Image (cartoon, rainbow, N blue to C red):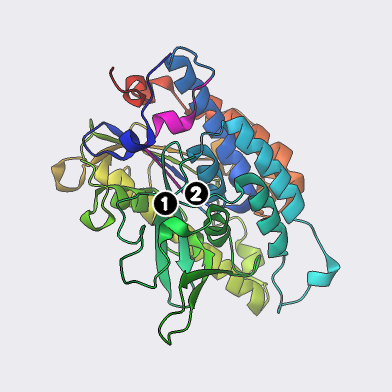
Amino acid sequence: MPNYRTFKQHLDPAIGPKRILALDGGGLRGVLTLGMLREIETILRIGHDDDPEFRLGNYFDLIAGTSTGAIIAAGLSLGMTVDEVHGHYMDLGNLVFKRSLLRWGALRAKYDAADVRKALLAVFGDRKLSSSDFRTGLLVVTKRLDTGSAWPITNNPKARYFERGTSSTTIPNGDYPLWQVVRASTAAPYFFDPETIAIGRAADGLEAVSGDFVDGGVSPSNNPALQALMTATMEGYRFGWQVGVDKMLVVSVGTGKADPAAGHANVIQATPAIHAVLSLKALMEDCADQVETLMQWLSSSPTARDIDREIGKCGPPLGGQALCSYLRYNVQFEASWCKEFLGESLSAQSIKGLEAMDEPKNIPELDRIGRLAGEKLVKAAHFDIAAATVAN
């Protein structure tokens, strides 16, 4: 049986090369992510003597997720298989995204956050970020709405705010309930109410402090790949991992990329409220494109795509030397792309219908396309199989 890294070894900067898995936000379109992850897991398991005990948490040293990606990342970091996460994800999706006449109107969130809390508690229980159950590193991206600051939260014991100082009233990140951190990252505005997390204790006449957190996708990190690279290498985050094409691999998996021109006529005719929602969505997509552009510019990547006709694949690397190896797997909701890369003939109307982030009836088709994308896009040659283990 392969000798896999322990949690401590996963985070140890002296043990490499390092592998990062970054998972996008995108509501129920996370089913696409799971389909592609299933192929990654299969390829890596075969490369590890077809070990039935192999998990993606054995291979990756840090698993990052935003919003729906945070749910998947948390499960994988605890040592779940992709199939196990898929099962929990299906239960959560069908429970949470229920239509209710009682929640119609502009002054209430579209869905009941209590259902999300119930589902996440059922999966993660009372585990905290300091839990010994973690198999590997975890990064969850959320945003504190009352201060406007993005919060990348990790289970790194060396992180600045992970443990309480001797005289501090601040509640350390290690004491945050895992389910609540994930819930905060999934609190998409319009769809769900914010999640309130206690971050400071009352003491010496000072009141307790809490923060209102919303979906990390409202920050520039709906695609958390760049934030994960920063977290692993910036001095302030205290991971201290080395960079280089042979020292770090970042694998980024998306939830589908919409064609911005497909709904142009509908945008023109939309109400002001819908304009606001569509504008926020467009901003998130712009940020995701920027992250993908920067990641291609900073890395060496066999999966690099043409960002646009002017900059192409963004080469050569910034400064002439790539910081990491980089893989990006995603589906584009365009008929021509699906035909060329998946061999699927899909109508523009059916593809447009799959863009919804909260439509349970899309789950079977998203699951099918995600699995197909994994089979077509993910290649064994992309991965250094031996890097998941530690020599005896």
**Residue 24's mark?**
2
The residue segment tinted magenta is 53-64
Image coordinates for residue 131, horizontal then vertical, percent: 47, 46
10 Å neighbourhood of mark 1: few (<14), some, or many (≥20)?
many
Q: Quadrant of the N terminus?
A: top left
Residue 264's quadrant in the figure? bottom right
**Residue 224's mark?**
1
**Residue 57's mark?**
none
Image coordinates for residue 248, horizontal then vertical, percent: 27, 36
Q: CA distance from mark 2 to mark 1?
A: 6 Å
Image coordinates for residue 286, horizontal then vertical, percent: 44, 60
User: Tag 1, which secondary structure?
Assistant: loop
Residue 109's quadrant in the figure? bottom right
Picture residue at 77% right of the left edge, 46% below the top:
361
Q: Is residue 315 left or right of residue 281?
A: left
**Residue 378 versus residue 47 in the image, above or below:** below
Q: Earlier in the sequence, mark 2 or mark 1?
A: 2
Q: Is 79 colored magenta in this rendering?
A: no
Q: Is residue 235 visible?
A: yes
Callout 2 touching callout 1 (CB < 8 Å): yes
Q: Is residue 168 left or right of residue 256?
A: left
In the image, 12 versus 66, the foreground residue is 12
Picture residue at 43% right of the left edge, 80% below the top:
203
Picture residue at 45% right of the left edge, 33% below the top:
57
10 Å neighbourhood of mark 2: few (<14), some, or many (≥20)?
many
Residue type (three-letter) at the residue carrying disc 2: Asp
